[in-house]
Amino acid sequence: MSLIRRLTKKSYKTFKSTFQEWKSNKKIVMIKKKRKHFRINSLNLLSITIYENNNIVKEGIGRTLNISESGVLLETHFPVDPNHTVLTAIGLKNDLVDIKGNVVRSITCEEGKFEIGIQFLEMDKAALMLLKKYIEAFGKQ
């Protein structure tokens, strides 16, 4: 009996959704877990402005580690409190996309780096179209 057939129905659904649409090569890995959108591994420079109670707390730069239509995992050299709202300007090839979001996680990594998970809140239609186009182009590689 195959591994999949031995899994319980619930486990099979989880397994299937985790590996459904799996695609990988040297430049990209697309994974769909319990997420609404696919994430692609992509390194892009960005600027980040951190807000607390509508006041700027800090500004800096970082880079994306992966990105989807609904969020981004980025790397910075400073921590960001999960209670903050951020405005990011992400460079996608020749375009700059401004996106507002909430910090949903912040992890301390080695060598003084931090991984910050951001869930997008506000994005205009033009920015969303650029982001979709970028993700689609990477998916075809």
Image (tube, rainbow, N blue to C red):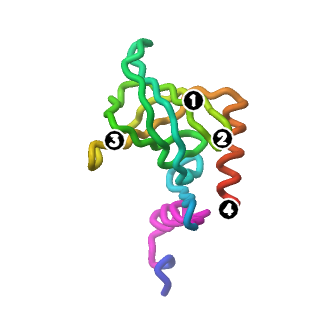
Q: Which of the 4 image quarters holds residue 90?
A: top right
Tags 2 and 1 touching, CB below 8 Å: yes
Label 4 sits on what residue type?
A: Gln
Q: CA distance from mark 3 to mark 1?
A: 20 Å
Percent across and percent down for residue 21 are 61, 63
Q: Which residue is mark 4?
A: 141
Percent across and percent down for residue 105 are 37, 38
Residue situated in front as seen by the camera: 87 or 21: 87
Q: Which residue is mark 2?
A: 131
Which numbered tag is attached to residue 139? Answer: none
Percent across and percent down for residue 85 are 44, 24
Tags 3 and 1 touching, CB below 8 Å: no
- The crowd level at tag 1 (other Cα within 10 Å; few <14, some 14-19, many 20+) is many
At 57% from the left edge and 29% from the top edge, which residue is drawn?
99
Task: Work out whether mark 3 precedes mark 2 in sequence or the reverse, and give the earlier one.
Answer: 3
Whether residue 2 is situated above or below residue 107 in the rendered picture: below
How many callouts does the rendering have?
4
Q: CA distance from mark 2 to mark 1?
A: 10 Å
At 57% from the left edge and 67% from the top edge, which residue is drawn?
25
Determine whether the residue tagged by mark 3 lies in a helix, strand or loop.
strand
Percent across and percent down for residue 16 are 54, 65
Q: CA distance from mark 4 to mark 1?
A: 25 Å
SS majority, magenta: helix
Label 1 sits on what residue type?
A: Ile
Which numbered tag is attached to residue 114? Answer: 3
Q: Which residue is mark 1?
A: 99
